[in-house]
């Protein structure tokens, strides 16, 4: 079994925008599950995003602006939503 993969320094070196956060969700019974969300734009303008939870990851790397129009709605609709 594996845990959450944190964003690496090498991934964001020279990045122009970085979002990196961990959210905790639980069923109110004392058990909580971490959801780690990372999003960044590389120096070359390519976009990257990961959503990790214990046992699962959904990610894209080096996406162009056109690809984001397809990938982001998929991730937003089927992945766990962090609180706003």
Image: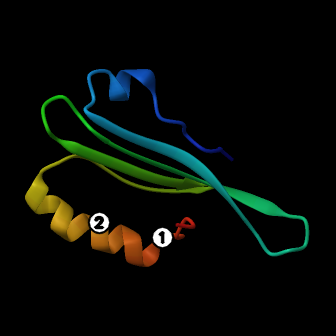
On the image, the x and y values in percent for residue 37 come to 49, 51
Secondary structure state at the residue bearing disc 1: loop
Which residue is rendered at x = 69% and y = 47% of the image? 1
The relative height of residue 74 versus residue 40 in the rendered view (above or below) is below
| Quarter location, residue 68 | bottom left
On the image, the x and y values in percent for residue 15 come to 27, 29
Q: Hey, which residue is sitting farthest right in the picture?
A: 30
- In primary-sequence order, the first of circles 1 and 2 is 2
User: Mark 1 — residue?
Assistant: 79
Left/right placement of residue 17 relative to residue 9 reads: left
The relative height of residue 20 versus residue 32 in the rendered view (above or below) is above
On the image, the x and y values in percent for residue 65 come to 12, 55
User: Mark 2 — residue?
Assistant: 72
Asked whether 45 or 83 is in front, the reply is 83
Which residue is rendered at x = 37% and y = 38% of the image? 18
The relative height of residue 65 versus residue 75 in the rendered view (above or below) is above
Left/right placement of residue 58 relative to residue 46 reads: right
């Amino acid at each position: 079994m594996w845990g959450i993969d944190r964003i690496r320094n090498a991934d964001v070196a020279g990045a122009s925008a970085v979002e990196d956060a961990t959210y905790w969700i639980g069923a109110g019974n004392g058990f909580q599950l971490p959801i780690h969300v990372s999003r960044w734009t590389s120096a070359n303008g390519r976009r990257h995003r990961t959503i990790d939870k214990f046992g699962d990851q959904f990610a894209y790397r080096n996406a162009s602006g056109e690809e984001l129009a397809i990938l982001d709605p998929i991730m937003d609709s089927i992945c766990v939503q962090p609180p706003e």
